[in-house]
Image (cartoon, helix red, strand yellow):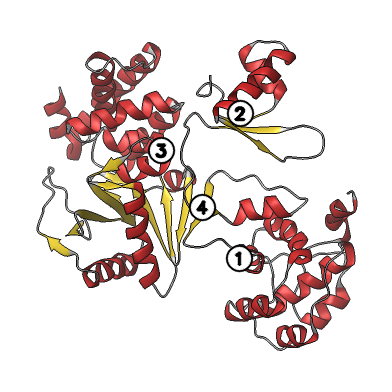
Amino acid sequence: MVTLDEQINLLKTIGADLERKIEALVIGGSAMMFLGAKTETKDIDLVLMREEDFLLIKKILKKNGFTEKRLRIIRGDYEPKINPTFLEGMNTRFDLFFKEVVCIKITESILERVKEVHQFGKLVVKVLSPEDIILMKCTTERTGDRDDGKSLVEKFKINWDIILEESLRQTKIGDSVFPVFLYDFLVELKEDLKVDIPKDVILKIMKIAEEEIIKAKKQPFRKALAEKIV
Amino acid sequence: MAKRLEGMQTVSTISKKLGIKRRTAINYVSKLRKEGFLRNYNGGRKVRFYIIDPLKRREVGYPGLYEVINKNSRIGLITRARYRVHGRPLSIEEVIVEAVNTGEYRTILASLDLFGKVRDWSKLKTLAVKNKLGRKVGALYDVARKFIRVRRMDLRTRKALLNSKVKSKYVIKNLRGKLGHFNDIEKLWEVYVPFNRADLMRYREW
């Protein structure tokens, strides 16, 4: 597990080795630590928006003793341009992503909502907003992510409209029906973890999710997925 | 309550949001501050702005570009994100160069006040020349000097800035003060100043 101070030191190490400015997005537990919603995390997740930056960070981490771990993300026919890279070392793991995190693509609107910007020498790290972190958490099925979701909802004033809009945007540009994931996630949070989520929000998302499933059934590339959900 | 009031507030927005009297809102502000959920934001001379954060968190790193400008300039900047710098604090000279580098109108305008706090002209010159902003920084210094009380730049720095190279003549992409109030400065430094006299009058208000 990595604490905030350790995470900062690791990012400082990368920043010190860089010769040009690189921008990265920090997501998941690492982002939550910067936002003060978590005290430690298993891995540091970075998203790079340029291929050369992705390769450079990978090179620097390897130079600092991190070794690449062979892991594959299996999710339908998910085939990214550059596979995510997992590098282990110094009792932690760096997960590097290029432009997308499994099925969520980093859009302009996500970048506009960035909550914090941390500069570590030449490395500029942008922290995602709690709304976008929740959206990313809802696409996984890990128990830890449910707990993180609970913590985010309890600690921040979440703008549900933002999450809903982004889930629709992601559905449009991607191959998944995000409002369905979101609905499942919120129902689990409300029923299992007793998180205070307004009922009208859940009803609104349920309605949109139903509409999206109907729409997806008409699209050949989403039909199989939509039928599976039903 | 901090969660409900998250973001930037004034006493009137708090009283409106919670449906309470102004006096009660002031009391709440005081309580939230004592608990560490609220900090003041200098947003002008009359209305006080407060930033309310529902999480009591440990500040990491040092103030970023916009925070340093806000601390040292009479023109305030509001940003969507919180900027922090790790390793060592930003110096005034670094902030001026970074501000010019952003190419943002208001950031550059607010950063003019920082010329009055420059201690190390040589450092400013080195940073500006390294970032290929030498002549732009020099021109902005001359503009600032017309409206704000600033320290005199030493001649060696001035000469070095005058002889430096810049990537583009525009301080802000495709923006040029149309009224020609700073033609003399533009001619000397061979860059386009993005301001008119009226823009700088904000400094005269103080």
Measure how far apart labels 1 and 3 are at the Cα level: 28 Å
Labels 2, 1: front one = 2
**Quick check: do tags 4 and 3 share a chain?**
no
Q: Secondary structure at mark 1?
A: helix
Hey, what amino acid is under mark 1? Glu
Q: Are marks 2 and 4 in contact (CB under 8 Å)?
A: no
Q: Are marks 2 and 1 on the same chain?
A: yes
Q: Is A143 drawn above or below residue A42 in the view shown?
A: above
Chain of the residue displaying label 3:
A
Amino acid residing under circle 2: Arg
**C-alpha gap between disc 1 and disc 4:** 14 Å
Q: Is residue A99 visible?
A: no
Look at label 4 and name its amino acid: Arg
Of tags 3 and 2, which is closer to the observer? 2
**In terms of depth relative to the viewer, which is nearer, A22 or B64?**
B64
Q: Position of residue A71 (x, y in %)?
A: 10, 54
Q: CA distance from mark 2 to mark 4?
A: 22 Å
Mark sitting on residue B98 = 1
Camera-side mark, 1 or 4: 4
- Name above or below for residue A53 compared with residue A180: below
Neighbor class of circle 2 (other Cα within 10 Å; few <14, some 14-19, many 20+) is some
Residue A20: quarter of image:
bottom left
Q: Residues within 10 Å of mark 4 (few under 14, many from 20)?
A: many
Please give the residue where the numbered disc 4 appears in the rendered image.
B84
Residue at mark 3 = A36
The local secondary structure at tag 3 comes to loop
Q: In the image, is B178 to the left or to the right of A92?
A: right
The amino acid at mark 3 is: Gly
Which residue has dot 2 on it? Answer: B33
- Which chain does the residue under circle 2 lie in? B
Tell whether A59 sits left or right of A38.
left
